[in-house]
Protein backbone atom coordinates (compact mmCIF):
# COMPACT_ATOMS: atom_id res chain seq x y z
CA UNK A 1 0.00 0.00 0.00
CA UNK A 2 1.04 3.56 -0.62
CA UNK A 3 2.98 4.93 2.31
CA UNK A 4 0.32 6.86 4.10
CA UNK A 5 2.57 9.74 5.11
CA UNK A 6 3.51 10.43 1.51
CA UNK A 7 -0.08 10.24 0.47
CA UNK A 8 -1.18 12.70 3.10
CA UNK A 9 1.68 15.00 2.21
CA UNK A 10 0.52 14.93 -1.36
CA UNK A 11 -3.10 15.53 -0.56
CA UNK A 12 -2.19 18.31 1.79
CA UNK A 13 0.16 20.01 -0.60
CA UNK A 14 -2.33 19.84 -3.43
CA UNK A 15 -5.17 21.27 -1.48
CA UNK A 16 -3.32 23.33 1.05
CA UNK A 17 -5.27 26.51 0.52
CA UNK A 18 -7.08 27.85 3.55
CA UNK A 19 -5.39 25.48 5.92
CA UNK A 20 -4.04 28.31 8.04
CA UNK A 21 -7.53 28.64 9.45
CA UNK A 22 -6.99 25.26 11.05
CA UNK A 23 -4.16 26.53 13.16
CA UNK A 24 -5.84 29.78 14.06
CA UNK A 25 -8.85 27.83 15.08
CA UNK A 26 -7.08 25.69 17.61
CA UNK A 27 -6.06 28.75 19.55
CA UNK A 28 -9.54 30.22 19.62
CA UNK A 29 -11.36 30.31 22.91
CA UNK A 30 -14.83 28.83 22.84
CA UNK A 31 -17.97 29.74 24.63
CA UNK A 32 -18.66 27.67 27.65
CA UNK A 33 -21.40 25.24 26.84
CA UNK A 34 -23.20 25.74 30.07
CA UNK A 35 -26.58 25.16 28.48
CA UNK A 36 -25.83 21.57 27.64
CA UNK A 37 -24.66 20.11 30.89
CA UNK A 38 -25.11 16.38 30.92
CA UNK A 39 -27.60 16.86 33.71
CA UNK A 40 -30.07 17.96 31.04
CA UNK A 41 -30.35 14.35 30.04
CA UNK A 42 -30.07 12.47 33.29
CA UNK A 43 -33.39 12.40 35.01
CA UNK A 44 -35.43 13.56 32.08
CA UNK A 45 -38.09 11.38 30.58
CA UNK A 46 -37.38 10.26 27.11
CA UNK A 47 -39.25 8.08 24.71
CA UNK A 48 -37.97 5.62 22.24
CA UNK A 49 -39.91 3.91 19.51
CA UNK A 50 -43.22 4.62 21.08
CA UNK A 51 -46.28 6.75 20.70
CA UNK A 52 -48.22 8.57 23.37
CA UNK A 53 -45.62 8.15 26.06
CA UNK A 54 -45.63 4.37 26.17
CA UNK A 55 -42.30 2.60 26.61
CA UNK A 56 -41.05 5.75 28.24
CA UNK A 57 -38.08 5.33 30.48
CA UNK A 58 -37.46 7.44 33.53
CA UNK A 59 -33.89 7.63 34.61
CA UNK A 60 -32.54 8.17 38.06
CA UNK A 61 -31.67 11.75 38.67
CA UNK A 62 -28.28 12.18 40.20
CA UNK A 63 -28.09 14.68 43.00
CA UNK A 64 -25.87 17.74 43.23
CA UNK A 65 -22.69 16.53 41.51
CA UNK A 66 -24.12 16.14 38.04
CA UNK A 67 -25.99 19.41 37.96
CA UNK A 68 -23.05 21.46 39.13
CA UNK A 69 -20.64 20.33 36.44
CA UNK A 70 -19.61 23.39 34.44
CA UNK A 71 -18.98 21.42 31.28
CA UNK A 72 -16.55 23.80 29.68
CA UNK A 73 -14.34 22.47 26.97
CA UNK A 74 -11.33 20.42 27.91
CA UNK A 75 -8.32 20.20 25.66
CA UNK A 76 -6.65 16.86 25.73
CA UNK A 77 -3.13 17.70 24.73
CA UNK A 78 -2.06 14.15 25.42
CA UNK A 79 -4.04 12.86 22.45
CA UNK A 80 -3.03 15.73 20.19
CA UNK A 81 -1.78 14.31 16.92
CA UNK A 82 1.29 15.67 15.25
CA UNK A 83 -0.38 15.11 11.89
CA UNK A 84 -2.66 18.06 12.45
CA UNK A 85 0.40 20.25 12.05
CA UNK A 86 0.83 19.06 8.50
CA UNK A 87 -2.10 21.33 7.73
CA UNK A 88 0.35 24.20 8.16
CA UNK A 89 2.06 23.45 4.85
CA UNK A 90 0.34 26.37 3.17
CA UNK A 91 3.61 28.07 2.31
CA UNK A 92 4.33 25.49 -0.33
CA UNK A 93 1.87 27.06 -2.75
CA UNK A 94 4.70 28.96 -4.37
CA UNK A 95 6.62 25.76 -4.95
CA UNK A 96 3.56 24.08 -6.39
CA UNK A 97 3.00 26.83 -8.88
CA UNK A 98 6.61 26.89 -9.95
CA UNK A 99 6.63 23.15 -10.39
CA UNK A 100 3.53 22.93 -12.53
CA UNK A 101 4.61 25.76 -14.78
CA UNK A 102 7.97 24.19 -15.57
CA UNK A 103 6.84 20.58 -15.66
CA UNK A 104 5.28 18.86 -18.64
CA UNK A 105 3.30 16.58 -16.37
CA UNK A 106 -0.44 17.26 -16.07
CA UNK A 107 -1.50 18.90 -12.87
CA UNK A 108 -1.68 16.11 -10.30
CA UNK A 109 -4.73 15.64 -8.17
CA UNK A 110 -5.48 13.17 -5.45
CA UNK A 111 -7.46 10.31 -6.92
CA UNK A 112 -7.71 8.10 -3.86
CA UNK A 113 -11.25 8.33 -2.60
CA UNK A 114 -11.78 8.97 1.09
CA UNK A 115 -15.21 7.62 1.96
CA UNK A 116 -15.86 7.19 -1.73
CA UNK A 117 -14.79 10.61 -3.01
CA UNK A 118 -11.29 12.08 -3.49
CA UNK A 119 -12.79 15.49 -2.71
CA UNK A 120 -13.52 14.40 0.86
CA UNK A 121 -9.90 13.71 1.86
CA UNK A 122 -9.20 17.30 2.77
CA UNK A 123 -12.62 18.01 4.19
CA UNK A 124 -13.21 17.91 7.88
CA UNK A 125 -15.14 14.99 9.29
CA UNK A 126 -17.75 17.53 10.37
CA UNK A 127 -18.15 18.99 6.88
CA UNK A 128 -19.59 15.98 5.06
CA UNK A 129 -23.16 14.78 4.56
CA UNK A 130 -23.39 11.04 5.21
CA UNK A 131 -26.17 8.54 4.73
CA UNK A 132 -27.03 6.89 8.04
CA UNK A 133 -28.78 3.53 7.99
CA UNK A 134 -31.33 3.74 10.79
CA UNK A 135 -31.19 0.69 13.07
CA UNK A 136 -28.52 -0.76 10.79
CA UNK A 137 -28.47 -4.24 12.20
CA UNK A 138 -32.22 -4.73 12.00
CA UNK A 139 -32.26 -6.38 8.62
CA UNK A 140 -34.18 -9.47 9.65
CA UNK A 141 -36.36 -10.96 6.91
CA UNK A 142 -40.09 -10.87 7.41
CA UNK A 143 -39.96 -8.90 10.62
CA UNK A 144 -42.12 -5.79 10.72
CA UNK A 145 -39.63 -4.28 13.14
CA UNK A 146 -36.83 -4.42 10.56
CA UNK A 147 -35.49 -1.12 9.30
CA UNK A 148 -33.13 -2.32 6.57
CA UNK A 149 -33.06 -4.94 3.86
CA UNK A 150 -29.30 -5.43 3.63
CA UNK A 151 -26.88 -6.24 6.46
CA UNK A 152 -24.22 -3.82 7.62
CA UNK A 153 -21.36 -5.02 5.42
CA UNK A 154 -23.53 -4.31 2.36
CA UNK A 155 -24.50 -0.95 3.80
CA UNK A 156 -20.84 0.00 4.11
CA UNK A 157 -20.01 -1.34 0.65
CA UNK A 158 -22.84 0.76 -0.76
CA UNK A 159 -21.65 3.98 0.88
CA UNK A 160 -23.49 4.23 4.19
CA UNK A 161 -20.99 5.82 6.59
CA UNK A 162 -23.01 6.08 9.76
CA UNK A 163 -24.41 2.95 11.36
CA UNK A 164 -26.91 3.45 14.13
CA UNK A 165 -29.12 1.41 16.33
CA UNK A 166 -30.90 0.49 19.47
CA UNK A 167 -29.05 -1.64 21.98
CA UNK A 168 -30.31 -3.28 25.15
CA UNK A 169 -28.53 -4.54 28.25
CA UNK A 170 -29.87 -8.06 28.88
CA UNK A 171 -28.26 -10.87 30.86
CA UNK A 172 -25.12 -8.77 31.34
CA UNK A 173 -24.67 -8.52 27.58
CA UNK A 174 -25.31 -5.75 25.07
CA UNK A 175 -27.74 -6.93 22.41
CA UNK A 176 -29.02 -5.29 19.25
CA UNK A 177 -32.72 -5.51 20.04
CA UNK A 178 -35.62 -3.52 18.68
CA UNK A 179 -37.79 -2.18 21.50
CA UNK A 180 -37.43 -5.49 23.33
CA UNK A 181 -35.38 -8.61 22.73
CA UNK A 182 -38.64 -10.55 22.35
CA UNK A 183 -39.71 -8.44 19.39
CA UNK A 184 -36.49 -8.46 17.38
CA UNK A 185 -33.10 -9.67 18.54
CA UNK A 186 -30.38 -9.16 15.94
CA UNK A 187 -27.55 -10.65 17.98
CA UNK A 188 -24.91 -9.20 20.21
CA UNK A 189 -23.46 -5.74 19.81
CA UNK A 190 -20.01 -7.31 19.81
CA UNK A 191 -20.78 -9.44 16.76
CA UNK A 192 -21.81 -6.41 14.73
CA UNK A 193 -18.69 -4.51 15.80
CA UNK A 194 -16.63 -7.48 14.61
CA UNK A 195 -18.22 -7.14 11.19
CA UNK A 196 -17.33 -3.45 11.04
CA UNK A 197 -13.78 -4.10 12.24
CA UNK A 198 -13.16 -6.57 9.48
CA UNK A 199 -14.69 -4.19 6.93
CA UNK A 200 -12.30 -1.46 8.13
CA UNK A 201 -9.38 -3.89 7.75
CA UNK A 202 -10.29 -4.24 4.07
CA UNK A 203 -10.97 -0.53 3.47
CA UNK A 204 -7.99 1.53 4.58
CA UNK A 205 -9.32 4.83 3.18
CA UNK A 206 -12.68 4.84 4.91
CA UNK A 207 -13.93 6.47 8.09
CA UNK A 208 -17.02 4.94 9.69
CA UNK A 209 -19.28 6.22 12.46
CA UNK A 210 -21.53 4.22 14.77
CA UNK A 211 -24.18 5.98 16.80
CA UNK A 212 -25.09 3.76 19.73
CA UNK A 213 -28.62 4.10 21.05
CA UNK A 214 -28.38 3.13 24.71
CA UNK A 215 -32.04 2.27 25.13
CA UNK A 216 -31.76 0.90 28.65
CA UNK A 217 -29.55 3.79 29.72
CA UNK A 218 -27.07 1.41 31.17
CA UNK A 219 -23.59 2.58 32.14
CA UNK A 220 -21.21 3.16 29.26
CA UNK A 221 -18.71 0.89 30.99
CA UNK A 222 -21.02 -2.02 30.16
CA UNK A 223 -20.21 -1.52 26.49
CA UNK A 224 -16.47 -1.73 27.01
CA UNK A 225 -16.07 -5.53 26.91
CA UNK A 226 -17.97 -5.79 23.60
CA UNK A 227 -15.87 -3.00 22.12
CA UNK A 228 -12.56 -4.32 23.39
CA UNK A 229 -13.27 -7.92 22.39
CA UNK A 230 -14.53 -7.09 18.92
CA UNK A 231 -11.16 -6.08 17.46
CA UNK A 232 -12.35 -2.56 16.67
CA UNK A 233 -10.46 -0.87 19.50
CA UNK A 234 -7.38 -0.15 17.39
CA UNK A 235 -9.46 2.01 15.05
CA UNK A 236 -11.29 4.05 17.67
CA UNK A 237 -11.00 7.78 17.38
CA UNK A 238 -10.46 9.82 20.52
CA UNK A 239 -11.12 13.51 20.06
CA UNK A 240 -8.64 16.17 20.94
CA UNK A 241 -11.26 18.33 22.62
CA UNK A 242 -14.07 17.41 24.99
CA UNK A 243 -16.54 18.27 23.67
CA UNK A 244 -15.15 18.78 20.19
CA UNK A 245 -16.73 21.59 18.23
CA UNK A 246 -17.72 21.65 14.57
CA UNK A 247 -14.55 23.28 13.31
CA UNK A 248 -12.20 21.26 15.51
CA UNK A 249 -12.65 17.96 13.75
CA UNK A 250 -9.74 16.62 11.72
CA UNK A 251 -9.96 16.00 8.00
CA UNK A 252 -10.70 12.51 6.75
CA UNK A 253 -7.11 12.34 5.46
CA UNK A 254 -5.78 13.02 8.94
CA UNK A 255 -8.00 10.36 10.46
CA UNK A 256 -7.02 7.87 7.77
CA UNK A 257 -3.33 8.58 8.24
CA UNK A 258 -3.53 8.15 12.00
CA UNK A 259 -5.56 4.96 11.55
CA UNK A 260 -8.27 6.25 13.88
CA UNK A 261 -11.14 5.70 11.48
CA UNK A 262 -13.95 4.53 13.71
CA UNK A 263 -16.01 7.14 15.54
CA UNK A 264 -18.41 5.97 18.24
CA UNK A 265 -21.15 8.17 19.60
CA UNK A 266 -23.66 7.28 22.32
CA UNK A 267 -26.91 9.12 22.94
CA UNK A 268 -27.29 8.72 26.71
CA UNK A 269 -24.83 7.88 29.47
CA UNK A 270 -21.62 8.50 27.58
CA UNK A 271 -18.83 9.55 29.92
CA UNK A 272 -15.74 10.63 28.05
CA UNK A 273 -13.71 10.75 31.23
CA UNK A 274 -14.34 7.09 31.92
CA UNK A 275 -14.51 5.86 28.29
CA UNK A 276 -12.91 8.48 26.04
CA UNK A 277 -13.64 6.72 22.75
CA UNK A 278 -17.42 6.72 23.24
CA UNK A 279 -18.38 10.29 22.44
CA UNK A 280 -21.39 11.97 23.94
CA UNK A 281 -23.75 12.40 20.98
CA UNK A 282 -25.66 15.30 22.44
CA UNK A 283 -22.50 17.28 23.07
CA UNK A 284 -21.64 16.99 19.37
CA UNK A 285 -24.70 16.21 17.27
CA UNK A 286 -28.26 17.48 17.61
CA UNK A 287 -31.26 15.84 15.99
CA UNK A 288 -34.47 16.85 14.26
CA UNK A 289 -37.70 15.30 15.68
CA UNK A 290 -37.30 11.66 16.55
CA UNK A 291 -39.31 8.74 15.11
CA UNK A 292 -41.26 11.11 12.87
CA UNK A 293 -44.73 10.36 11.59
CA UNK A 294 -45.01 13.81 9.98
CA UNK A 295 -44.22 13.69 6.28
CA UNK A 296 -43.29 17.37 6.32
CA UNK A 297 -40.12 16.38 8.20
CA UNK A 298 -39.55 19.77 9.81
CA UNK A 299 -35.86 20.51 10.34
CA UNK A 300 -36.36 21.88 13.82
CA UNK A 301 -33.90 21.07 16.57
CA UNK A 302 -35.37 18.61 19.09
CA UNK A 303 -32.69 16.77 21.04
CA UNK A 304 -30.77 17.66 23.13
CA UNK A 305 -33.35 19.81 24.87
CA UNK A 306 -32.39 23.38 25.76
CA UNK A 307 -29.52 23.60 23.30
CA UNK A 308 -29.09 27.23 22.36
CA UNK A 309 -29.84 28.02 18.73
CA UNK A 310 -26.50 29.77 18.32
CA UNK A 311 -24.52 26.85 19.70
CA UNK A 312 -26.52 24.44 17.55
CA UNK A 313 -25.78 26.48 14.48
CA UNK A 314 -22.13 27.27 15.09
CA UNK A 315 -20.68 24.38 17.02
CA UNK A 316 -22.69 21.21 16.48
CA UNK A 317 -23.09 18.70 13.70
CA UNK A 318 -26.68 17.65 13.11
CA UNK A 319 -28.67 14.61 12.15
CA UNK A 320 -31.87 14.70 10.09
CA UNK A 321 -34.28 11.95 11.09
CA UNK A 322 -35.90 11.06 7.80
CA UNK A 323 -37.46 7.71 8.63
CA UNK A 324 -41.22 7.71 8.40
CA UNK A 325 -43.06 5.66 11.00
CA UNK A 326 -46.47 4.20 11.42
CA UNK A 327 -48.12 3.03 14.63
CA UNK A 328 -49.11 -0.60 15.07
CA UNK A 329 -50.40 -2.67 17.92
CA UNK A 330 -47.57 -4.39 19.76
CA UNK A 331 -49.79 -7.40 20.53
CA UNK A 332 -50.24 -7.95 16.80
CA UNK A 333 -46.48 -8.35 16.46
CA UNK A 334 -45.49 -10.44 19.44
CA UNK A 335 -48.84 -12.03 20.32
CA UNK A 336 -50.88 -11.57 23.43
CA UNK A 337 -53.50 -8.99 24.18
CA UNK A 338 -51.26 -5.97 24.54
CA UNK A 339 -53.01 -2.85 23.38
CA UNK A 340 -49.72 -1.00 23.39
CA UNK A 341 -48.91 0.92 20.25
CA UNK A 342 -45.40 0.96 18.86
CA UNK A 343 -43.91 2.68 15.84
CA UNK A 344 -42.54 0.68 12.94
CA UNK A 345 -41.16 1.83 9.58
CA UNK A 346 -43.81 2.94 7.11
CA UNK A 347 -42.70 0.73 4.24
CA UNK A 348 -45.68 1.63 2.07
CA UNK A 349 -44.30 5.14 1.62
CA UNK A 350 -40.61 4.20 1.58
CA UNK A 351 -39.87 5.08 -2.05
CA UNK A 352 -41.32 8.53 -1.64
CA UNK A 353 -39.67 9.06 1.75
CA UNK A 354 -36.24 8.20 0.35
CA UNK A 355 -36.80 10.14 -2.86
CA UNK A 356 -34.22 12.40 -4.49
CA UNK A 357 -36.62 15.08 -5.67
CA UNK A 358 -37.59 18.35 -4.07
CA UNK A 359 -41.11 17.11 -3.48
CA UNK A 360 -43.38 16.55 -0.51
CA UNK A 361 -42.12 13.93 1.92
CA UNK A 362 -38.90 13.20 0.02
CA UNK A 363 -35.38 13.19 1.42
CA UNK A 364 -34.16 15.87 -0.97
CA UNK A 365 -36.90 18.22 0.23
CA UNK A 366 -35.73 17.79 3.81
CA UNK A 367 -32.09 18.25 2.85
CA UNK A 368 -32.95 21.53 1.14
CA UNK A 369 -35.21 22.64 3.94
CA UNK A 370 -32.49 21.98 6.47
CA UNK A 371 -29.87 23.77 4.40
CA UNK A 372 -32.17 26.76 4.14
CA UNK A 373 -32.77 26.82 7.89
CA UNK A 374 -29.28 26.08 9.16
CA UNK A 375 -26.99 27.38 6.44
CA UNK A 376 -25.50 23.97 5.73
CA UNK A 377 -26.89 20.53 4.98
CA UNK A 378 -27.27 17.86 7.67
CA UNK A 379 -24.19 15.81 8.54
CA UNK A 380 -26.25 12.67 8.77
CA UNK A 381 -29.34 11.69 6.80
CA UNK A 382 -30.98 8.91 8.78
CA UNK A 383 -33.13 6.62 6.64
CA UNK A 384 -34.85 3.24 6.71
CA UNK A 385 -34.29 0.86 3.78
CA UNK A 386 -31.47 2.98 2.35
CA UNK A 387 -31.50 0.87 -0.82
CA UNK A 388 -34.97 2.05 -1.84
CA UNK A 389 -36.11 5.43 -3.11
CA UNK A 390 -37.38 7.46 -6.01
CA UNK A 391 -36.68 7.23 -8.87
CA UNK A 392 -34.95 4.00 -7.81
CA UNK A 393 -32.19 2.42 -5.75
CA UNK A 394 -29.42 4.82 -4.81
CA UNK A 395 -31.67 7.87 -4.46
CA UNK A 396 -30.49 8.53 -0.90
CA UNK A 397 -26.87 8.60 -2.06
CA UNK A 398 -27.84 11.05 -4.81
CA UNK A 399 -29.25 13.35 -2.15
CA UNK A 400 -26.07 13.12 -0.05
CA UNK A 401 -23.86 13.67 -3.10
CA UNK A 402 -25.83 16.75 -4.06
CA UNK A 403 -25.47 18.14 -0.54
CA UNK A 404 -21.73 17.45 -0.77
CA UNK A 405 -21.32 18.96 -4.22
CA UNK A 406 -20.01 15.72 -5.73
CA UNK A 407 -21.32 13.31 -8.35
CA UNK A 408 -22.72 9.95 -7.32
CA UNK A 409 -21.82 7.39 -9.93
CA UNK A 410 -22.09 4.02 -8.29
CA UNK A 411 -24.41 1.09 -8.63
CA UNK A 412 -26.89 0.51 -5.88
CA UNK A 413 -27.40 -1.58 -3.86
CA UNK A 414 -26.45 -4.84 -2.23
CA UNK A 415 -23.97 -5.84 -4.93
CA UNK A 416 -20.94 -5.90 -2.69
CA UNK A 417 -17.71 -4.02 -2.82
CA UNK A 418 -17.11 -1.76 -5.81
CA UNK A 419 -14.23 0.24 -4.43
CA UNK A 420 -11.32 -2.20 -4.35
CA UNK A 421 -10.26 -2.04 -7.99
CA UNK A 422 -10.16 1.76 -8.41
CA UNK A 423 -8.05 2.13 -5.29
CA UNK A 424 -5.36 -0.18 -6.60
CA UNK A 425 -5.23 1.61 -9.94
CA UNK A 426 -5.21 5.12 -8.60
CA UNK A 427 -2.54 4.35 -6.03
CA UNK A 428 0.08 4.51 -8.75
CA UNK A 429 -0.95 7.95 -9.84
CA UNK A 430 -1.03 9.21 -6.32
CA UNK A 431 2.22 7.55 -5.43
CA UNK A 432 3.80 9.30 -8.37
CA UNK A 433 2.32 12.60 -7.38
CA UNK A 434 3.35 12.10 -3.79
CA UNK A 435 6.93 11.48 -4.83
CA UNK A 436 6.95 14.61 -6.96
CA UNK A 437 5.72 16.64 -4.05
CA UNK A 438 8.02 14.98 -1.59
CA UNK A 439 10.91 16.12 -3.77
CA UNK A 440 9.48 19.60 -4.22
CA UNK A 441 8.99 20.06 -0.55
CA UNK A 442 12.33 18.66 0.48
C1 LIG B 1 -31.01 13.96 46.76
O1 LIG B 1 -31.62 15.19 47.02
C2 LIG B 1 -32.84 15.08 47.75
C3 LIG B 1 -33.47 16.47 47.83
O2 LIG B 1 -32.50 17.45 48.07
C4 LIG B 1 -32.56 14.49 49.12
O3 LIG B 1 -33.76 14.35 49.86
C5 LIG B 1 -31.93 13.13 48.94
O4 LIG B 1 -31.56 12.58 50.19
C6 LIG B 1 -30.68 13.22 48.05
N1 LIG B 1 -30.20 11.90 47.76
C7 LIG B 1 -28.93 11.56 47.88
C8 LIG B 1 -28.57 10.17 47.49
O5 LIG B 1 -28.08 12.35 48.20
C1 LIG C 1 5.42 33.59 -3.92
O1 LIG C 1 4.20 34.10 -3.48
C2 LIG C 1 4.22 35.48 -3.17
C3 LIG C 1 2.88 35.83 -2.60
O2 LIG C 1 1.86 35.26 -3.38
C4 LIG C 1 4.59 36.28 -4.40
O3 LIG C 1 4.67 37.64 -4.08
C5 LIG C 1 5.92 35.80 -4.94
O4 LIG C 1 6.23 36.46 -6.14
C6 LIG C 1 5.88 34.31 -5.17
N1 LIG C 1 7.19 33.82 -5.60
C7 LIG C 1 7.34 33.02 -6.63
C8 LIG C 1 8.72 32.57 -6.90
O5 LIG C 1 6.40 32.64 -7.33
C1 LIG D 1 -18.99 22.07 4.08
O1 LIG D 1 -18.38 23.33 3.87
C2 LIG D 1 -18.79 23.97 2.68
C3 LIG D 1 -17.96 25.24 2.54
O2 LIG D 1 -18.13 26.05 3.66
C4 LIG D 1 -20.28 24.26 2.74
O3 LIG D 1 -20.71 24.83 1.53
C5 LIG D 1 -21.03 22.95 2.97
O4 LIG D 1 -22.41 23.22 3.14
C6 LIG D 1 -20.50 22.25 4.20
N1 LIG D 1 -21.16 20.94 4.36
C7 LIG D 1 -21.51 20.46 5.55
C8 LIG D 1 -22.21 19.15 5.58
O5 LIG D 1 -21.25 21.04 6.57
C1 LIG E 1 -31.64 -13.97 29.19
O1 LIG E 1 -31.66 -15.09 30.05
C2 LIG E 1 -32.94 -15.70 30.18
C3 LIG E 1 -32.83 -16.80 31.21
O2 LIG E 1 -31.77 -17.66 30.92
C4 LIG E 1 -33.37 -16.25 28.83
O3 LIG E 1 -34.65 -16.80 28.91
C5 LIG E 1 -33.40 -15.09 27.81
O4 LIG E 1 -33.71 -15.56 26.53
C6 LIG E 1 -32.07 -14.38 27.78
N1 LIG E 1 -32.19 -13.21 26.94
C7 LIG E 1 -31.44 -13.01 25.84
C8 LIG E 1 -31.69 -11.79 25.06
O5 LIG E 1 -30.58 -13.79 25.49
C1 LIG F 1 -17.49 9.78 34.62
O1 LIG F 1 -16.39 8.98 34.88
C2 LIG F 1 -15.51 9.52 35.87
C3 LIG F 1 -14.26 8.63 35.91
O2 LIG F 1 -14.64 7.29 36.05
C4 LIG F 1 -16.23 9.62 37.18
O3 LIG F 1 -15.38 10.18 38.14
C5 LIG F 1 -17.46 10.49 37.00
O4 LIG F 1 -18.22 10.51 38.17
C6 LIG F 1 -18.33 9.98 35.85
N1 LIG F 1 -19.40 10.94 35.59
C7 LIG F 1 -20.67 10.60 35.63
C8 LIG F 1 -21.65 11.70 35.32
O5 LIG F 1 -21.04 9.48 35.87
C1 LIG G 1 -39.69 23.43 3.67
O1 LIG G 1 -40.77 22.55 3.86
C2 LIG G 1 -42.04 23.12 3.72
C3 LIG G 1 -43.08 22.08 4.04
O2 LIG G 1 -42.85 20.89 3.31
C4 LIG G 1 -42.18 23.72 2.33
O3 LIG G 1 -43.44 24.33 2.19
C5 LIG G 1 -41.08 24.72 2.10
O4 LIG G 1 -41.14 25.22 0.79
C6 LIG G 1 -39.74 24.11 2.33
N1 LIG G 1 -38.71 25.11 2.25
C7 LIG G 1 -37.60 24.94 1.52
C8 LIG G 1 -36.61 26.04 1.54
O5 LIG G 1 -37.39 23.93 0.88
C1 LIG H 1 -40.31 0.80 -4.41
O1 LIG H 1 -39.64 0.80 -5.64
C2 LIG H 1 -39.17 -0.48 -6.03
C3 LIG H 1 -38.40 -0.31 -7.32
O2 LIG H 1 -37.35 0.60 -7.13
C4 LIG H 1 -40.33 -1.43 -6.19
O3 LIG H 1 -39.86 -2.71 -6.49
C5 LIG H 1 -41.11 -1.49 -4.89
O4 LIG H 1 -42.27 -2.28 -5.05
C6 LIG H 1 -41.52 -0.10 -4.43
N1 LIG H 1 -42.10 -0.20 -3.11
C7 LIG H 1 -43.28 0.35 -2.81
C8 LIG H 1 -43.79 0.11 -1.43
O5 LIG H 1 -43.91 1.03 -3.60
Image (cartoon, rainbow, N blue to C red):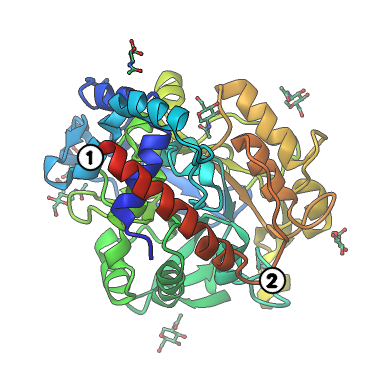
x and y percent of residue 254 in the render? Answer: 33, 46
Can residue 113 be seen? yes
Q: Nearer the viewer, residue 166 or 238?
A: 238
For mark 2, what is the residue?
A: 415
For mark 1, what is the residue?
A: 442
Distance between the alpha carbons at the discs numbered 1 and 2: 44 Å
Secondary structure found at label 2: loop
Answer whether labels 1 and 2 touch (C-beta < 8 Å). Answer: no
Identified at 68% across, 27% down, the residue is 369
Identified at 62% across, 31% down, the residue is 299
Secondary structure found at label 1: loop
x and y percent of residue 128 in the render? Answer: 51, 39
Q: Is residue 78 left or right of residue 229?
A: left
x and y percent of residue 378 in the render? Answer: 56, 36
Dot 1 or dot 2, earlier in sequence: 2
Identified at 39% across, 26% down, the residue is 98
Identified at 52% across, 49% down, the residue is 111
x and y percent of residue 43 in the render? Answer: 34, 44
Rendered view: 306 above or below 167 = above
Badge count: 2
Amino acid sequence: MLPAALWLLCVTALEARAQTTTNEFYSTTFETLSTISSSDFDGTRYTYISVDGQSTVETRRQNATATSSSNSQITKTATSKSVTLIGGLTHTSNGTQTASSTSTAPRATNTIPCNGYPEFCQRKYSNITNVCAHNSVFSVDNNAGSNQEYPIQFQLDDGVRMLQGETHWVNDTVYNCHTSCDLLNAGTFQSSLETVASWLDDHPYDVVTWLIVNSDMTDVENYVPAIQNSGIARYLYEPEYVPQRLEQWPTLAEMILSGKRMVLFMDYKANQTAVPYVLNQFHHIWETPFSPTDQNFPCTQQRPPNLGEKIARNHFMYLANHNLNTAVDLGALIGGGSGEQILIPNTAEINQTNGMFDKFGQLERMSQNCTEMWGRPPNFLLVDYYNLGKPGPGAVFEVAAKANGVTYNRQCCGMGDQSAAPIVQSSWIVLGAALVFAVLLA
